Image (spheres, rainbow, N blue to C red):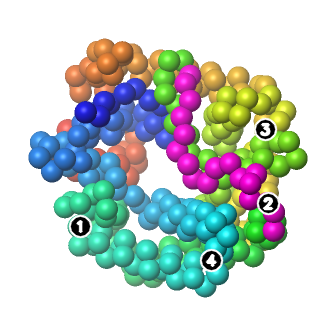
Amino acid sequence: MIENLFSWSKSTDEKFQDCPRKFYYDKYLSWGGWETSSPRRTRAAYVLKNLKNRWAWKGERTHHIIEQVLKSMRRGQPIPPETALSNLTQMMREDYRSSRERKNWQDPKNNVGLFEHEYKKNIDDAVWKRVHDEAAACVRHFYGSDLFKELAAEDKSGWLMIEDLEEFQFDGAKIYVKLDFARKKDGVVEIIDWKTGKNGSDNSLQMGVYALFASEKWKLPLERVRASIFNLTSPFPVLAPEPLSVELIEKARGIMSKSIQSIRELLEDPVKNIPKPVEAFAFARRAEICDRCNFYRICEKYC
């Protein structure tokens, strides 16, 4: 039997900070909803949990294509750019069609559900086409970059991770991380994070968590870990180093500890990860959070 063990990730913290009630639906109400025999409300929470808005969908599919490209390259079977772009288009068309037909309600594991379809948002065809075109542009920019040429030419034995879900322990909690790409180069572990959206977001917590993971995973001092952002929305993307310092690591540790403690305070049994009654998990105070929430359909605030 699968246990609902306590865990933490950056996305977990974001959900909790947005709305504790949303966090409850995501982590507790939805648990077991993958079973067709699960209670109706549990099943609904699981389906809604897996919805993606169009921006997240664009990013996820771009990441998936790059993952395919790099893993094939590592096997010595490079994928031509036109094939990668064709795969992207086919994948997104199938996603869009199955979402519009609500196939995710029958089989949420194998069908994408888009937030805009679930909540009947009036999105013009031109907008959907632009989402695809932006994803395709990211893939083309990746192929045209100096980094791609470098990766294609180098010895792949130094590649450590390509979109692998990993974990480590911190404050008695399982911490999940998923590195887009990591390699060992010149005695240094280099972590590269693909970005497919707007610039300007603060990446310090994400990179701090990655650095903590890398130091533990590969038993390295901080000075032998590098982290960079690679913004694929740029026609000429370049590696943009993210400074890693003792101060940044300590700040990340502090944020993680505070977040984990805040969540545990809402648990009836922190060891068994049993939550307090749903009423203990407050609603979001800002309406804009509710407007974009996957769980709007089942939230007691509106039902």
Please state the extent of the stretch shown in magenta in the rendering.
153-170
Question: Image point 23% across, 73% down: which residue?
Answer: 101
Of mark 1 and mark 3, the one earlier in the sequence is 1
Of mark 4 and mark 2, the one earlier in the sequence is 4
281 over 295 or under it: above or below: above
The span from disc 1 to disc 3 (Cα, nearest Å) is: 43 Å
Residue 155 inside the magenta-drawn segment:
yes
**What residue sits right under mark 1 in the picture?**
103
Check the picture and name the quadrant holding the C terminus.
Answer: top left
Q: Nearer the viewer, mark 3 or mark 4?
A: 4
Contact (CB < 8 A) between labels 1 and 3?
Answer: no
Label 2: how many Cα within 10 Å (few below 14, some 14–19, many 20+): few
213 over 259 or under it: above or below: below
Of mark 3 and mark 4, the one earlier in the sequence is 4
The span from disc 3 to disc 2 (Cα, nearest Å) is: 19 Å
**What residue sits right under mark 3 in the picture?**
225
Query: What amino acid type is highlighted by mark number 1?
Result: Lys
Q: Residue 64 placed where, x, y %?
A: 53, 63
The span from disc 1 to disc 4 (Cα, nearest Å) is: 30 Å
- Can residue 9 be seen by looking at this rendering? yes
The span from disc 1 to disc 2 (Cα, nearest Å) is: 43 Å
Q: Residue 142 placed where, x, y %?
A: 69, 70
